[in-house]
Image: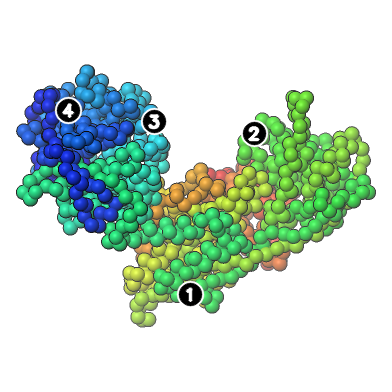
Amino acid sequence: MRPDRSIVFTLLLFSICGCGSEPAAGPTAPAAPKPPPIAAHPDEVHLTDLRQLTFGGENAEAYWSWGGDQLILQARGGQQACDRINRMAPFAAQPAFTPVSSGKGATTCSFFLPGDREVIYASTHLGGDACPPRPDHSKGYVWALYPDYDIFRGNADGTGPLARLTDTPGYDAEGTVCGKDGSIVFTSVRDGDIDLYRMDADGKNVRRLTNTPGYDGGAFFNADCTKIVWRASRPEGKDLEDYKALLAQNLVRPTKLELYVANADGSDPTQITYLDAASFAPYWHPSQKRILFSSNYGAPSPREFDVWAVDVTGANLERVTTAEGFDGFPMFSPDGQWLAFSSNRATPPGQHDTNVFVARWNESAVAPAANKPERAADRIMRLASTLADPALEGRGVGTPGLEKAGTAIEAAFRDAGLTPAGAGGFRVPFEVATSVSGDAHVTLGGKAVDAADAKPLGFSESGSTEGQLVFAGFGIVADGWDDYAHLDVKGKIAVVRRFVPDAPAFAKMEDQRRHGDLRHKAFIAREHGAKGIIVVDLPEKPKDAAKDWKMPDEARFPALDSDVAGDAGIVAVVTSRKAMEPVVERLQKKERIAAKIETSLTPVTAPAFDVLARWPAQVPDAQKLPGVVLVGAHYDHLGYGGRDSLAPDRHEPHLGADDNASGAATLVEVARALAESKAALRRDVVFAAFSGEEMGALGSTWLVRHPMPGMAPADIVGMINMDMVGRLRDNALQVFATDTATEWPDMLDRACAEARIHCVHAAGGGFGASDHSPFYAADVPVLHLFTGTHSDYHKPSDTADKLNAAGMAQIAVAAERLASDVANHEGRLHLQHVASPPPRGDVRGFGSSLGTVPDYAGPPKGQKGMLLAGVRPGGPAEKAGMKRGDILVKLGDHAIDGVEDLMYVLMANKPGTTLRAVYVRDGKQTTIDVTLGESTRR
């Protein structure tokens, strides 16, 4: 496209489009008789059967027809003053040009429409027959954005009238086509910036795709038109001022361009290169998983351009061509067999021709090491892919997959040259309650239920109870729904249906999960005075059911690990439909039936471990500073869906590529980079890969409670946490807890500038649903690096192929700089206790808030209640006098046996409600009044 041509021809001392015109008939740059294939350079291993198609003049941007038998390109030769659009048959005995454009004005950016009978291109001919003036290079190297360029549609043979597709003032060009529906992505200045737009094949239904200041252009669709790739600049500060000043003169300076990929509607824009070079002309590899493009990256001269390839993740950068001079505008034939590109590799010395070449693509060839150097993005992607491999089955606590993940991280730390910082090695072991084992004995109306037909629920109280049965429907109490209305279950045993009613009130999955939660049903039964609860999968026949309605198959019993956070204060079992259906029928007829339930449960623990590595200070002892810097990320995930017994995808492993293979892999890269640089740090930096985060920050909590020598909270100068850093979009990193130390904002600005990413400061405190929270509760300044939520969060679809390896590599640069700055900071960081913004990521939302931060490890010695890891500054709990270490045991009329009970109480009460709270501190109970605040839900 025109600006791409400018970078080639200007840098190589070509002239840019002058003025004048050519007649429509006759070829503009005749091709020589077809020569035999020529040899590619020895290290251009992907190119075979290389052929030169044009001989003389300036020929570039040769794009394939959808049938793969033609190329359309712009060319200028002989006495021509402007580029002209031509077609050619690349595999003909003597390839020759067939003119497409009239020769009036300047033309650029041609592309076939589906069917190959029509084409589009940009032209200035409505502004006059003459070529536009050349750009003013007294302003340096710039491209001209000719305001007379508009996009036209016409016949591929050049006959007939042209249809004008764009008619807004200013530059409209750089159009390419979707092969499915003929829609066009193009570049325009119609809204005051240089942005991408999409329109239908007839020019209607124009939609803007980009809106960040900077140049966005040269976009291409992928094969199924679900994605686009393009080149972009993102100037800031004085560069942005310069950009705007030039744009006002219809100019742009293109010396720094990077590649972006996004959905075809422009959403989720992802930068995949950080080459700090002029990179342009990206095109999709046949696999749709890689991009070929042109760049002067690493060249000895800015005039040297080659074709490169990179994964859409930003990993595996590879140099494809190595010839001197210019190689660019790569495009694959529709069958993926041939690559067309422009080059001056065969131009004799002293001449300035650029010609079109085609080569058969050899995908299986292995690139020389010099063409494919390993980079940070490659290392991060390799480790993240290993951690998110389906063979590790989601890295659930207590599983072989998590053990393998920890071993891989341990090996990576060792290979990077770090020393162990754990308990006699890299590991810090601890035990985690992963499930419960036990059995249940149920007697109904004096008849014992078979052992196979009754099972304790994982949150059941161990013990025995007996009483009259009361059928309570689905056991749900919600707005507009109350199964306990007019029922007396005090001192009795409630019988409830599993799941939720087939009713509009429960149509949303969120409502099904909330109200179908078995522990919630047990809580409601307990709050109504029931001594026990029996759950059965016995759907209610709809009132409007057909005569042939059949009850759906019975769901399997919920797993005993459905909740291991403590018992619900009530004896709870699930029974089979066979055992309970006749009993329910009798209860619905108001018959009295007595029952007895006995349960015996024992927690089952599994070993887990954090992985700790140390990079020691690299200065003489006299220059060392007290304390350590901690950089952390968790490496566990949900396994087969965690504790959600209603999850429809429990049979699929939740791979957790972003959450948090991304953070763990980036953590290792930060450690490797520090070790490789051997920076003169004045404090040790400890790297911690935590386990048990998904179960409530258990690994980080353990480390706070049982610190390694020299790593007590008072020894930690600052903690940097990376959780979900794998989806950097629009080059923007969210950073939470920036107010926890007065020094963080300046340090962060320096780190992000060095990493060439935009960091969004999320002011507030350090409480949040990740591993930084226990450290902040222990008075350590913290930061949480985060690239944002997405629809794959906590789903099996959170896979490694969706990661942005290039973005993670830049985040590693920022984290390394942050760690170095803290390591060299004189004195401690100045801790601040401030209110936190609503948390992001792994967080539940309630109807109201108490302002407490739960410690998911729970109270000591099996006590009931909710242990507080901290209280949010300015929140209801702090105002009422509660603090870290308190154990909340009652709120209002409700016993609080664990965090779930508090959640249910908060969901049922509105902000502004005043309740009496009872908590235990140092073995003594204290009663206070507390007024609930707004929900923490995001």
- Of labels 4 and 2, earlier in sequence is 4
Q: Which residue is mark 4?
A: 99
Question: How far is mark 4 from mark 2, CA to CA?
Answer: 61 Å
Secondary structure of the residue carrying numbered label 4 = strand
Secondary structure of the residue carrying numbered label 2 = loop
Instruction: Give 434 or 868, whichever is nearer the viewer.
Output: 434
Q: Residue at x 64, y 39 (%)?
A: 511
- Compared across the picture, whether 896 is left or right of 835 comes to right
Camera sees residue 612:
yes
Q: Which mark is residue 420?
A: 1
- Percent across and percent down for residue 111 are 27, 32
Circle 1: residue type: Pro
Q: Which residue is mark 3?
A: 180
- Of labels 3 and 1, earlier in sequence is 3
Question: How far is mark 4 from mark 1, CA to CA?
Answer: 70 Å
Choose mark 4 or mark 1, whichever is in front. 4
Asked if marks 4 and 2 touch (Cβ < 8 Å), the reply is: no
- Compared across the picture, whether 171 is left or right of 551 comes to left
Choose mark 3 or mark 1, whichever is in front. 3
For label 1, count other residues whose C-alpha is less than 10 Å away and answer few (under 14), some (14-19) or many (20+). many
- Of labels 2 and 3, earlier in sequence is 3
Circle 3: residue type: Lys
- Compared across the picture, whether 837 is left or right of 74 comes to right
For label 2, count other residues whose C-alpha is less than 10 Å away and answer few (under 14), some (14-19) or many (20+). few
- Of labels 4 and 1, earlier in sequence is 4
- Percent across and percent down for residue 252 are 20, 40
Q: Which residue is mark 2?
A: 507
Question: How far is mark 2 from mark 3, CA to CA?
Answer: 36 Å
